[in-house]
Image: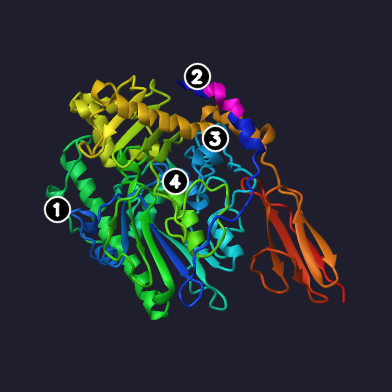
Amino acid sequence: MHHVARAVGAAILMIWASVTLASTPETKQTQSEAGAKLNFLFVVFEDMGPRIGAFGDTVATTPVLDAFAAQSAQYANTFTTAGVCAPSRSSLITGVHQQTLGTQHMRTRSPSSLLSSGGPISYDAVPPADVKAFPELLRKAGYYTSNNGKTDYQFGEPFTVWDDQAAEHPWRGRPDNKPFFAMVNVLETHESVIWPIDAFSMNPLVNIVRLRNLWTLSGKEQITDPERVDVPPYLPDTPVVRADIARHYDNIAFAEKQLAQMLDDLEADGLADNTIVVVTTDHGDGFPRMKRAIYDSGIKVPMMVRFPDRRDAGIKHDRLVSFVDLGPTFLSLAGVDVPDYVQGQPLFSQSPAAPRDYIVAGSDRFDGMPEYQRAIRDERWKYIRNYRPDLPFFQHLNFRDQLPTMKELWRLHEEGSLTPIQAQYFATPRPEEELYDTTTDPHEIQNLAANPAHTDTLTRLRAAYDAFTASTADLSSIPEAEMIEAMWPDMQQPETAPVVFTVNGDSLSLTSATEGASIGYQHGENPAWHLYTGPFEIAPATSVTAKAIRYGYAESTPTQYTQPQ
């Protein structure tokens, strides 16, 4: 099966390289009855499955999230496109699956210059030319966009996406009371916050994270009894594992206070009545066989949408939602055209699309650990295709191996003390196909792919997956080095062409010869980079500095123009 994928890879790469994705209108959504532009607060907890009381978890201590859920439409069948942060985030921010963007490998570039990314070289993926992060499209439409520092899209950090990508406050830094889109990432639920803080590693990044945790968790209380937690059958039921799960619950209880503060700030600033608040997580819990997996434990996340008028408050919706749907949803709610290249669909619009039949997810290289899996799921059934059945599910991975639960798995594996369910994740070969009934088997333990009673379901989902891959480029079907070479000829990062100024009287136009380049400029004495959206007037003796960026390329050299007296 892997050879079949490799054979079509060159053709897929040619299609990817030649794609020009036009931004034609799809649909618009009325802003509000008063006609004012809506604000958006988008809160993303890290490494957290649906461990919320309102989503049925009886162990969770989440009064803030529970109260927010009571005010919100709830989407319990929301799925990320990957079980790990950066690939998932790249698809969220663009509305395009990571394997189409070339952002599927975790990571393309290491966050530390002392470490290898695990790939052939450290690189930034180069998406098709017309692909833009949806906050940039909102910014183009007049929104102030902010992020609290967690970008990590695998195609670099284009300076045109955010007005402030390290905002001290989500919206209070905006000028002139502009409408805002603020994305806040809550780090205190991250996998690394479960690590013990008193052990140091030869890995400098691990040590930096541990030191950060000492500060981050100041004031956190221990409130969860390890004896009360549920241990899934694919993890060993030992005191070590129970302690880790209890610590994760405590981290969630500690972290939700940030959401409470933001909601209070909205009220204090008089913005609650004109702000849509969306709360979700970037993928499943930060435990083995959850994070990095495309089982539901890795990709099924809670999502809550609070409208100013509290429509659908407390109502649970069963429709399938993919992370590629979030970008077009925000755009349509803001009245911004949804580009044709977007692979998702808006959830709320004047002409809503029919609910999707399937969601698709993928798993690829993690640091130096090779992997290649794909999954497709309907409301009940999950189909997984393993392109590397020769590899065990669990391989040594430095970051994951810091977790006491993973250390416990390795210890019991070496002792031969794991249950058959747990031991299968260390075994080879893996089945080429997996099929699960998520209703009767929510942990996805019993593979039904070889069961004749489910042949029709297997055939249907296999055909659905094949149809998706036939219509959607999957750059994992070729070697990573070949993909990089197509994006970065001779393995060197291309540089965006510099900005050229064209003057027409007192009007100034900016262009770059690089296809798909975004342009930003500084005007007069204002040091802020403005997103260029079209010609603008320039006063005599005024200087403009501009630079351009195509996602995945290096920024252009800044150029300057001064209008004569």
Say whether residue 8 is magenta. yes
Question: Any mark on residue 473, and which?
Answer: 3
Q: Quadrant of residue 535?
A: bottom right
Residue 200 tag number: none
- Mark 1 to mark 2 CA distance (whole Å): 49 Å
Circle 4 is placed at which residue position? 88
Q: Looking at numbered disc 2 in the image, what kind of residue is underneath it?
A: His
Question: Which residue does the image show at 52% across and 28% down from the upper left?
Answer: 477
Q: Residues within 10 Å of mark 3 (few under 14, many from 20)?
A: many
Asked if residue 555 is among those painted magenta in the image, a careful observer would answer: no
Is residue 249 in view from this perspective? yes
Q: What residue is disc 2 on?
A: 3
**Numbered disc 3: secondary structure:** loop
Find disc 1 in the rendering and name its residue: 225
> Toward which corner of the image does residue 538 lie, by quadrant?
bottom right
Front disc: 3 or 4: 3
Which label lies toward us, 1 or 3? 3
Q: Specify which label sits upstream in the sequence, 4 or 1.
A: 4
Q: Of helix, strand and loop, which mostly describes the magenta segment?
A: helix
| First in sequence: mark 2 vs mark 3 | 2
Judge whether 208 appears above or below 402 on screen: below
Quarter the C terminus occupies: bottom right
Q: As rendered, which of 213 and 363 lies closer to the eye?
A: 363
Q: CA distance from mark 2 to mark 3?
A: 17 Å
Q: Identify residue type, mark 4.
A: Ser
Q: Measuring 49% from the left and 59% from the top, which residue is drawn there?
A: 149
Magenta part of the protein: which range? 6-11
**In the rendered structure, are the residues bearing label 1 and label 2 in contact, judged by CB atoms less than 8 Å apart?**
no
